[in-house]
């Protein structure tokens, strides 16, 4: 709340004055009764009564006008307070969502390996909304309810301590009912939050995998699984619904019991001349006011508990440390080509389940290196470590003689271009997906990159060209077209180092020919690492690294490795023989 303290201060001032207005209206009613309808010598607001006419008709009109002024002021104050807190709440939630997204952008990939996307979406949506409800209609309103309660009790004691104590006699029962309500709703809200997160995670996973669901006719099973998750969500609300169902009628019953006791006792007091009729009328109005804040406080307690649970998850995310961080004094990245060295590198994603074991090799500037091996051999892990998505456990990775951990990760990745097997496209345009927000990539660089990867003919056929809209994940584009956009993206940023991770494994033969021609232009003058299964790409590499069970087992050119008749030769016999390029 601190950044918005001015708006909160004004809202609090409005609440304070509005609380006084809530106390004034019953007193005005009392004056009207005791001064004009049932005259006596009682005086409660002498500063006001001195301005009132002694004539009943004129005096009632004056009190009515003053009453109208008080409720009008109360209306304006309530509107101002609501407007300020609702708008301030939206500003606060805007800033909070911005902080959450900024934090997630700064977290390392290992964090996202452990946390489902649906639950992270829940943090930004449902949990932030819970905090917004507390901020906009909870914290300040709680104080307003407390002020109204205190002012009303003070006015009641001033009018009649006996009647006040009679009204308060039911309070132990009210508090007992409230405690039961809080306990029930608190446990229900905990289950509701878990159920909402599960629904979000389920929806995210199954919508992304809708093609696989339909391909394998999994719709009925998926619908059955969703019914289970959805039913858990529905049943989680049952406790809260039951609690709200009995709480408000119970409070209403107790308040009516208190008013009935007030009517019986106060009636005899009025007939005996101990109390005035105006006091009785004012007490009935105060009686209705004293239970409403208690109901509101109980409901706000529920909002508070929900918000605390949401805040715990949100701040846990905001406080999540990143294992991959920039050093205090980062080294400058080498401007010219520099040698990449893997020196006795050991790495495991979990514990000591080593994915890479004592791997050592070097890549000279301008060299094209291919990495091959069975699935799970650690090929993609090499590039993940080089881009510092993860930090190694043992050994070192150096560029230009400087350990990778001494660079700022942002500065490091700025010099690398990577093309993945399944390039991720964002909602926007083709040009926007190639630029990815980089202002230094102008229209000329955009067109040149598209031309060099043989994508320009396809773009020119589109009515909007580079402004052609792209839907989520590139829906509507073929796999080959998305792949070529990925190549253009890497080339447009003009990286010093290029990484191709199975970049040609999902394209047809015609597209592969285009990609092969593009590759020859892309790798020229750049240090390149190619992870591929297609021999047409691997044969042109300066050296080939063969990984097997996390270890670097063979290094050499295509012909050298075939002549050695080792692991690469076996891979060649199994996978590549029919794909050899005839020269």
Image: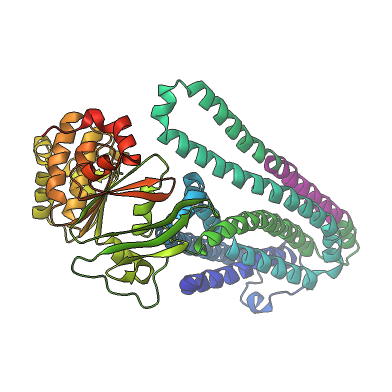
For the rendered model, the colour scheme is rainbow
- Look at the image and say whether residue 68 sits in the magenta stretch: no
Residue 206 visible in the shown view: yes
Residue in view at x 50 percent, y 62 percent: 318
Vertical placement of 523 versus 70: above or below? Answer: above
Vertical placement of 354 versus 14: above or below? Answer: above
315 or 438, which is in the foreground? Answer: 438
Vertical placement of 14 versus 271: above or below? Answer: below
Where is residue 166 drawn, in percent x and y?
Answer: 86, 61
**Left or right of 364: which side holds 554?**
right
Residue in view at x 84 percent, y 54 percent: 173
Residue 477 visible in the shown view: no
In this rendering, the count of numbered labels is: 0
Where is residue 496 drawn, in percent x and y?
Answer: 20, 60
272 or 357, which is in the foreground? Answer: 357
Res 351 quadrant in image = bottom right
Where is residue 450 drawn, in percent x and y?
Answer: 13, 45
- Look at the image and say whether residue 252 sits in the magenta stretch: yes
Report the magenta residues as a range.
240-264
Residue in view at x 46 percent, y 72 percent: 3
């Amino acid at each position: 709340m601190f950044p918005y303290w001015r708006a909160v201060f004004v809202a609090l001032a409005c609440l304070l004055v509005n609380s006084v207005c809530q106390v004034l209206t019953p007193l005005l009613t009392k004056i009207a009764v005791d001064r004009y309808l049932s005259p006596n010598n009682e005086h409660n607001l002498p500063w006001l009564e001195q301005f009132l006419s002694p004539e009943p008709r004129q005096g009632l009109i004056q009190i009515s006008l003053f009453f109208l002024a008080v409720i009008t002021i109360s209306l304006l104050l309530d509107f101002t307070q609501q407007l300020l807190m609702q708008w301030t709440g939206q500003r606060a939630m805007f800033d909070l969502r911005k902080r959450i997204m900024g934090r997630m952008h700064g977290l390392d990939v290992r964090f996202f390996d452990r946390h489902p996307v649906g639950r992270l979406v829940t943090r930004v949506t449902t949990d932030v909304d819970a905090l917004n409800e507390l901020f906009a209609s909870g914290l300040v309103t709680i104080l307003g309810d407390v002020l109204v309660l205190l002012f009303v009790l003070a006015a009641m004691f001033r009018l009649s301590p006996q009647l006040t104590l009679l009204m308060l006699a039911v309070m132990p029962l009210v508090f007992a009912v409230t405690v039961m309500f809080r306990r029930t709703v608190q446990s229900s809200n905990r289950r509701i939050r878990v159920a909402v997160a599960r629904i979000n995670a389920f929806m995210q996973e199954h919508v992304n995998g809708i093609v696989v669901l339909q391909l394998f006719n999994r719709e009925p099973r998926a619908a059955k699984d969703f019914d289970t998750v959805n039913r858990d969500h529905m049943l989680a609300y049952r406790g809260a619904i039951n609690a709200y169902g009995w709480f408000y009628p119970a409070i209403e019953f107790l308040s009516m019991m208190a008013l009935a006791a007030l009517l019986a006792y106060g009636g005899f007091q009025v007939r005996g001349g101990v109390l005035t009729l105006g006091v009785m009328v004012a007490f009935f109005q105060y009686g209705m006011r004293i239970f409403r804040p208690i109901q509101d406080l109980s409901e706000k307690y529920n909002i508070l508990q929900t918000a605390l649970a949401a805040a715990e998850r949100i701040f846990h995310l905001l406080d999540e440390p990143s294992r991959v961080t920039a050093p205090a004094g980062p080294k400058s990245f080498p401007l010219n080509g520099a040698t990449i060295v893997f020196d006795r590198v050991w790495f495991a994603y979990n514990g000591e389940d080593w994915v890479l074991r004592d791997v050592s090799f070097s890549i000279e500037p301008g060299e094209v290196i291919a990495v091959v091996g069975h699935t799970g051999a650690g090929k993609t892990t090499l590039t993940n470590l080089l881009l510092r998505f993860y930090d190694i456990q043992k050994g070192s990775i150096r560029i230009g003689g400087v350990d990778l951990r001494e660079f700022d990760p942002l500065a490091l990745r700025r010099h690398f271009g990577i093309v993945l097997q399944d390039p991720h496209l964002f909602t926007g345009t083709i040009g926007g997906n190639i630029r990815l927000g980089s202002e230094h990539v102008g229209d000329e660089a955009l067109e040149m990159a598209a031309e060099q990867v043989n994508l320009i003919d396809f773009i020119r056929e589109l009515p909007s060209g580079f402004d052609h809209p792209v839907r989520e994940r590139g829906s509507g584009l073929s796999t080959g077209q998305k792949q070529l956009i990925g190549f253009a993206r890497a080339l447009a940023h003009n990286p010093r180092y290029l990484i191709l991770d199975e970049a040609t494994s999902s394209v047809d033969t015609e597209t592969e020919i285009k990609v092969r021609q593009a590759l020859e232009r892309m790798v020229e003058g750049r240090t390149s690492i190619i992870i591929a299964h297609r021999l047409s790409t691997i044969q042109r590499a300066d050296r080939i690294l063969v990984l097997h069970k996390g270890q670097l087992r063979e290094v050499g050119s295509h012909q050298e490795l075939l002549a050695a008749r080792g692991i690469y030769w076996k891979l060649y016999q199994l996978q590549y023989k029919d794909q050899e390029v005839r020269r």
